[in-house]
Image (cartoon, grey):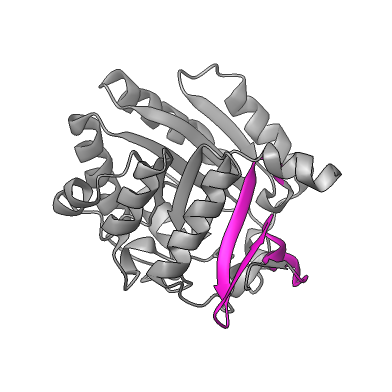
Amino acid sequence: MQEEIEIQHRRVGVIMLHGACSMSCLFCITENSLTEMTSEQVEEVLKIIEERDMESVVFGGGEPLQWTYSLVHSINLAKSLGLHTQVGTNGIGLTSNIIEKINADRYILPLDSVNPQVHNYLRGGFRKHYDIIRKRLKYLTERGISFTISTVICRVNIDILSEISAFLLHLWDKGARIHAWHLYRFLPLGRNGFKNANMLNISKNEYFDKTEEMKKRDLPFFVYRRPNMKLSKEVDFFWAEEGCIKIGSQVWFEKQSPDCLCK
């Protein structure tokens, strides 16, 4: 009964469409075990999300814009079910034409520093990534499209969060529809996070002290502390392994046996 109560109160369903990505960020926690969902599997998951009275769906990955099936179709289906649609992307493929084509309600984009060298270093040495993100944010701001910013806090950027805060406030003053700033703690997990743990790890106290500073700034958008999403009581994750749809509160991080939705 307790598990049923928790499921009913989960507001967001995150669909991990596949594990592939055009980038190799130093703190990537995606597992290589993720396989690609088919369009039919995503349709099944969306119906489950609707049946559980969730409010929102996030299409993620890997990189959702590299999914080989139609993201437009899945977003339109989600909207027809009354779900708020979000796309969590690295931004590389999020051109103005793609934004207009997929027409999601909100986009989730990364920003780990306003120093291009620091941001690009953390994003696997992708030298132009910072410039791409700034361009995407400019377009979304000009078009009045809602977006969320995600920052992974680690040893490299923990002391420069104030600069990101000031930049986001500047965007807000220019009319940006910033829904939230998500402050994730680096976790030594997944295909890159584990091997870079010694270089990037921070303590729980360091993380909470720095994020508390940001939350006390009373910014005009939500500031969410995300120390460990696998413990979230608001989110369920859906993914595929060996052709089977699985669901859990990010239990794939812990190599446990998640619920399987295969019939």
Where residue 181 appears, as percent x and y from the top left, is 49, 35
251 shown above or below 159: below
Figure quadrant of the C terminus? bottom right
Magenta-colored span: 232-257
Frontmost residue, 157 versus 34: 34
Q: Is residue 201 left or right of residue 21?
A: right
Residue at the farthest bottom position: 242
Residue under the point 22% across and 45% down = 135
Q: Name the quadrant of the N terminus.
A: top right
Name the image quarter holding residue 54.
top right
Residue 46 visible in the displayed image: yes
Give the residue at x 52% y 66%: 26
Q: Residue furthest front?
A: 263
Total tally of numbered discs in the picture: 0
- Examine the rendered structure and indicate whether residue 205 appears above or below residue 143: below
- Decide if residue 108 is in sight here: no
Lateral position of residue 13 relative to residue 258, left or right: left
Outermost right residue: 1
| Residue 237 part of the magenta-drawn span | yes
Of residue 125 and residue 106, the one placed in the foreground of this image is 106
Residue 69 percent coordinates (x, y)? 32, 70
Q: Is residue 257 left or right of residue 212?
A: right
Q: Quadrant of residue 124?
A: bottom left
